[in-house]
Amino acid sequence: MGYYTNYEISIQKHNSVIDVHSEDFIDMVVTRLSEISDYEFDKDLSQYGIKWYDWEEHMRKLSSEIPSVLFIVNGVGEEDGDIWRAYITSGKCQLESAIVAFPPFDESKLQ
């Protein structure tokens, strides 16, 4: 058994002059991430329904190798409410859980 999660990774320049959207750069990231993680990534840098338990360690390693970019990893787990985002750069990670909130009742919105 295991826990399945959907992962979507995006890249931003952060403190870099690298064109993070160039085909060569994306190819390099895909290749390196596939080597580090043992998952085969495509150019869209997404994986759906996988058990990538070491994602944070792998992304920290990748970001240490390319310290001038910001990787954003969005995750959605199989349990309700398991939605999170990680910001990773220079081998450091900020992990945030989604905050789901409902606005208060507003009688004027009744239809």
Image: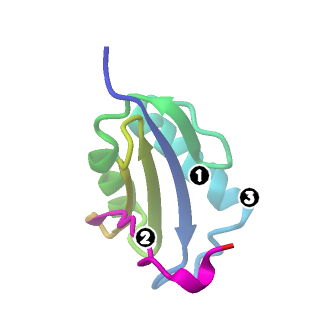
Q: Report helix, strand or loop for mark 1.
A: helix
- Tag 1: amino acid: Met
User: Residue at (68%, 47%) from the top-left corner?
Assistant: 43
Residue wearing tag 3: 23
Point out the tag, 2 or 3, that comes first from the N-terminus. 3
Residue wearing tag 1: 28
Residue wearing tag 2: 102
- Tag 2: amino acid: Phe
Tell me where the magenta segment starts and ends, as one range. 94-110
User: Residue at (29%, 35%) from the top-left corner?
Assistant: 53
Q: Height in image: 109 above or below 40?
A: below
Q: Height in image: 105 above or below 15?
A: above
Q: Between marks 1 and 3, how big is the CA–CA gap?
A: 9 Å
Judge the density around disc 2: few (<14), some (14-19), many (≥20) Cα neighbours within 10 Å: few
Judge the density around disc 3: few (<14), some (14-19), many (≥20) Cα neighbours within 10 Å: few
User: Residue at (35%, 47%) from the top-left corner?
Assistant: 82
Q: In x, y percent, where is residue 96?
A: 30, 65
Residue furthest top in the image = 1
Q: Height in image: 19 above or below 35?
A: below
Quadrant in which residue 55 is drawn: top left
* 80 is within the stretch colored magenta: no
Q: Quadrant of the C terminus?
A: bottom right
Q: Report helix, strand or loop for mark 3.
A: helix
Q: Report helix, strand or loop for mark 2.
A: loop
